[in-house]
Image (cartoon, grey):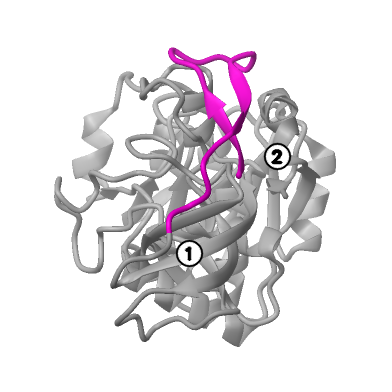
């Protein structure tokens, strides 16, 4: 089978087209999936450029979607022909994560889905929402599930809440869609007026250009009439966290998801206790989260926003497009 591998220590010029042995037939409890699509996440990018160290000749990509072609003995959840999507943490079934349940990460600690076939334990996959293409399904396991756990599982978002989303990447677009489905009012931020208009078309109620409004946390609070927002999907990290804290109401929730502005920085801790804020670290989600999310997607008819698609051999170009930050929504690989 054809696959893409990454030479250690990484770099966008280190991808290699590989001709690998066919996937082995499934043992008891396993399935073989013909993969058709993947999607790019920031985690995949930092692996690709060598910022996160992984094994030499690792098959990258944490997201995978395709069709079940062989079912092993004892598997009852899937049948041949089922359309399926991968789990970011295949061993995390429910409740809170433990070191043991998040040890396996496809495309990082184990081989990922930039290949034509894979044989794995059946719990590595779930069924895709009805009517989803393989590319659409491949956008869900990391970005959508992260937004879902941040807003729904951890945040318990409800009708009438105010939600602030940062930027227009995959997590933020999904967060907008989930928040609107829950009946929340959404404030969207971006440095691009054009991208903000696209967020408005998806349902964003209020728009803030953070280059023009540098104290956007204060502006967001003004939009709520001075009360503050109930939830922030914090994708920036240390460079944006302070403004997120200013945006929140007393007792508000910040789902800390990203590190786009770095991995450490100063935090005004007095805001945490004086406003009694709750900050939750979010690293994707569990199998239960994914099943719950897929049911909600099917009920509400939510569809992902796909910016562009590249062939498997074009993986480096896909990452360069991601690197340019010109995209809106998700970038996919289709093969």
Q: Position of residue 63 (x, y in %)?
A: 52, 50
In the image, is 170 to the left or to the right of 307?
Answer: left
Q: Position of residue 302 (x, y in %)?
A: 66, 74
Instruction: Name the quarter where the N terminus is drawn.
Output: top right
> Callout 1: helix, strand or loop?
strand
Please state which of residues 1 and 327 is positioned toward the viewer in this rendering.
1
- In the drawing, what numbered circle is on residue 312? 2
Q: How far is the residue under mark 2 from the one under mark 1?
A: 19 Å
Whether residue 269 is visible here, answered yes or no, is: yes
In the image, is 72 to the left or to the right of 137?
Answer: left
Mark 2 vs mark 1, foreground winner is 1
Please state which of residues 285 and 262 is positioned toward the viewer in this rendering.
285
- In the drawing, what numbered circle is on residue 24? none
Which of the two labelled residues, at mark 2 and mark 1, occupies the earlier sequence position?
Answer: 1
Which quadrant of the structure image shows residue 154?
A: bottom left
Whether residue 304 is visible here, answered yes or no, is: no
Q: Residue at x 39, y 34 (%)?
A: 108
- Disc 2 crowd rating (10 Å Cα; few below 14, some 14-19, many 20+) is many
- Are the two marked residues, 2 and 1, in contact with CB atoms closer than 8 angstroms? no
Count the labels in the image. Answer: 2
Q: Residue at x 62, y 66 (%)?
A: 177
In the image, residue 278 sits, relative to residue 66, either above or below, namely: above
Q: Which residues are magenta?
A: 1-24
Which quadrant of the structure image shows residue 265?
A: top left
- In the drawing, what numbered circle is on residue 32? 1
> Callout 2: helix, strand or loop?
helix
In the image, residue 306 sits, relative to residue 239, either above or below, namely: below
Q: Position of residue 96 (x, y in %)?
A: 19, 60
Q: Residue at x 62, y 23 (%)?
A: 16
Magenta stretch encompasses residue 210: no
Q: Position of residue 241 (x, y in %)?
A: 41, 33
Q: Residue at x 81, y 61 (%)?
A: 201
């Amino acid at each position: 089978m054809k696959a893409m591998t990454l030479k250690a220590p990484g770099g966008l010029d280190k991808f290699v087209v590989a001709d690998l042995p066919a996937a082995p037939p499934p043992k008891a409890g396993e399935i073989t999936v013909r993969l058709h699509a993947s999607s790019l996440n920031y985690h995949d990018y930092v692996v690709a450029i060598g910022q996160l160290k992984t094994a030499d000749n690792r098959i990258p990509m944490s997201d995978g979607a395709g069709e079940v072609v062989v079912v092993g003995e004892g598997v009852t959840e899937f049948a041949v022909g089922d359309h399926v999507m991968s789990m970011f943490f295949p061993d995390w079934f429910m409740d809170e994560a433990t070191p043991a349940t998040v040890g396996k990460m496809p495309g990082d600690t184990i081989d990922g889905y930039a290949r034509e076939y894979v044989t794995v334990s059946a719990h590595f996959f779930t069924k895709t929402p009805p009517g989803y293409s393989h590319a659409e399904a491949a956008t869900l396991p990391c970005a959508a599930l992260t937004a879902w756990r941040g807003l729904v599982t951890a945040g318990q978002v409800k009708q009438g809440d105010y939600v602030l989303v940062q930027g227009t990447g995959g997590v933020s677009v999904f967060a907008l869609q989930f928040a609107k489905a829950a009946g929340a009012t959404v404030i969207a931020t971006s440095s691009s007026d054009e991208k903000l208009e696209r967020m408005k078309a998806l349902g964003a109620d209020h728009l803030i250009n953070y280059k023009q409004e540098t104290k956007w946390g204060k502006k967001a609070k003004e939009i709520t009439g001075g009360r503050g927002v109930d939830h922030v999907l914090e994708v920036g990290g240390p460079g944006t966290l302070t403004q997120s804290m200013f945006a929140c109401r007393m007792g508000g929730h910040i789902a800390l998801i990203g590190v786009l502005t770095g991995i450490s920085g100063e935090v005004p801790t007095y805001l945490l206790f004086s406003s009694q804020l709750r900050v939750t670290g979010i690293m994707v989600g569990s199998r239960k989260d994914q099943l719950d999310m897929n049911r909600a997607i099917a009920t509400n008819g939510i569809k992902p926003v796909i910016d562009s698609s590249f062939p498997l051999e074009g993986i480096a170009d896909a990452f360069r497009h991601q690197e340019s930050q010109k995209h809106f929504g998700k970038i996919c690989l289709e093969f």
